[in-house]
């Protein structure tokens, strides 16, 4: 395992995860940080560390569930004030309250990644996330649209449960008026708590997207050879593909519906997805920066 830690002023990661809390209002069967006894991340120390980054960075505000922090809006304001971009990864239960969405928007949060493992199906949510919460998820999605957030949705595809999730997601987007989004599709990662069931392979995920979104395999394979970000290496197990070929000049990933297909089912001996990745970092409990997946694996069931 190529594990290392960097001082904040030496950070080279373009995306840095900050686990602002280990508390959660759900008990999902797939969770890379299942330990609920860890204290919340200190805001002042976090901002001090982020302020030392040598360049503007995408800060991914994650949890367990970041909305468990009552001071989350202030946390977001301070991240934006020091010049970084920010996106929040959430289960969305609190976002079913429109007033709370407006508070987050006023804190200058513009981008939200909403987990939709069950899409609009309570039976799927119960089997994957152990909570019948489809109504709240759909309400959260509608509130994000109404308040003009940039929206990503994330869905773990589980064999024998939510196999039809992709077509259901496209139907849900149409129903709530989403025309620009990134639909993130992945399989089960072997980190923390996870479902011990037959897993989809990358090729099977691609086939599902092709069939349910009516995208040709030629179209998908072409985009599989395009790096996620310009001037970066191609990630073999993670790539973007547009539902419809974008027009010249359209903003990459933000015009129309895009899929991001990712293989979290690692085959390396350490069980780490995307080993040696130089794009994704994680703020450690000591306020250094480490490779995201390597740090998670090193601290499994701990931090």
Image: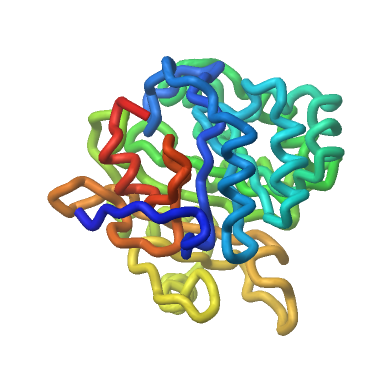
* Quadrant of the image occupied by residue 172: top right
* Residue plotted at (57% across, 34% down): 119
From the viewer's perspective, tell me whether residue 172 is left or right of residue 42.
right
For the residue pair 287 and 176, the one nearer the viewer reads as 287
Q: Residue lying farthest left?
A: 269
Q: Is residue 172 left or right of residue 264?
A: right
In the image shown, does 74 or 156 lie closer to the viewer? Answer: 74
Residue located 81% across and 39% down the image? 107
Q: Position of residue 80 (x, y in %)?
A: 74, 49
Q: How is the rendered protein coloured? A: rainbow
Viewer-side residue, 54 vs 264? 54
247 with respect to 153 (left or right): right
Residue 82, position as x, y percentages in the image:
72, 52
Q: Is residue 242 visible?
A: yes
Does residue 49 sit above or below 140 in this rendering?
A: below
Q: Residue reaching furthest bottom?
A: 248
Number of callouts in the render? 0
Task: Specify the quadrant of the image occupied by residue 139.
Answer: top right
Residue at the spot 53% in from the left edge and 72% down from the top edge: 229
Instruction: Tell me, yes or no, if residue 135 can be seen here.
Output: no
Q: Residue at the spot x=51%, y=16% of the render?
A: 131
Which part of the image, by quadrant, shows the C terminus?
Answer: top left
- Is 296 or 234 nearer to us in this picture? 296
Residue 69: % across, % down = 65, 23
In this view, 194 is above or below 12: above
* Residue 193: image location, x then y, percent: 32, 27
């Amino acid at each position: 395992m190529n594990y290392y830690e960097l001082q904040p002023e030496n950070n080279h990661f373009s995306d840095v995860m900050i686990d602002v809390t280990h508390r959660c209002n759900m008990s999902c069967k797939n969770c890379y940080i299942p330990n609920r006894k860890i204290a919340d991340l200190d805001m002042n120390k976090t901002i001090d560390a982020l302020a030392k980054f040598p360049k503007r960075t995408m800060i991914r505000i994650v949890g367990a569930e970041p909305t468990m922090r009552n001071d989350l809006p202030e946390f977001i304001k301070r991240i934006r004030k020091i010049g970084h971009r920010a996106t929040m990864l959430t289960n969305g239960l609190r976002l079913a309250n429109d007033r709370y969405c407006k508070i987050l928007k006023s804190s200058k949060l513009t981008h939200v990644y909403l987990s939709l493992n069950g899409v609009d199906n309570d039976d799927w949510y119960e089997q994957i996330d152990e909570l019948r919460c489809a109504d709240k998820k759909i309400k959260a999605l509608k509130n994000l649209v109404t308040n003009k957030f940039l929206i990503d949705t994330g869905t773990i595809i589980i064999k024998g449960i939510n196999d039809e999730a992709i077509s259901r997601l496209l139907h849900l987007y149409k129903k709530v008026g989403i025309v620009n989004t990134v639909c993130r599709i992945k399989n089960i990662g072997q980190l923390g708590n996870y479902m011990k069931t037959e897993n989809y392979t990358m090729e099977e995920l691609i086939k599902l997207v092709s069939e349910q979104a009516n995208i040709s395999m030629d179209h998908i394979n072409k985009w599989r050879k395009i790096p996620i970000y310009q001037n970066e290496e191609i990630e073999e197990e993670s790539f973007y593909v547009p539902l419809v070929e974008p027009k010249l000049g359209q903003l990459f990933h933000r015009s129309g519906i895009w899929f991001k297909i990712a293989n979290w089912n690692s085959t390396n001996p350490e069980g780490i997805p995307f080993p040696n990745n130089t794009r994704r970092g994680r703020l450690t409990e000591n306020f250094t920066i480490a490779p995201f997946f390597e740090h998670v694996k090193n601290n499994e069931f701990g931090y």
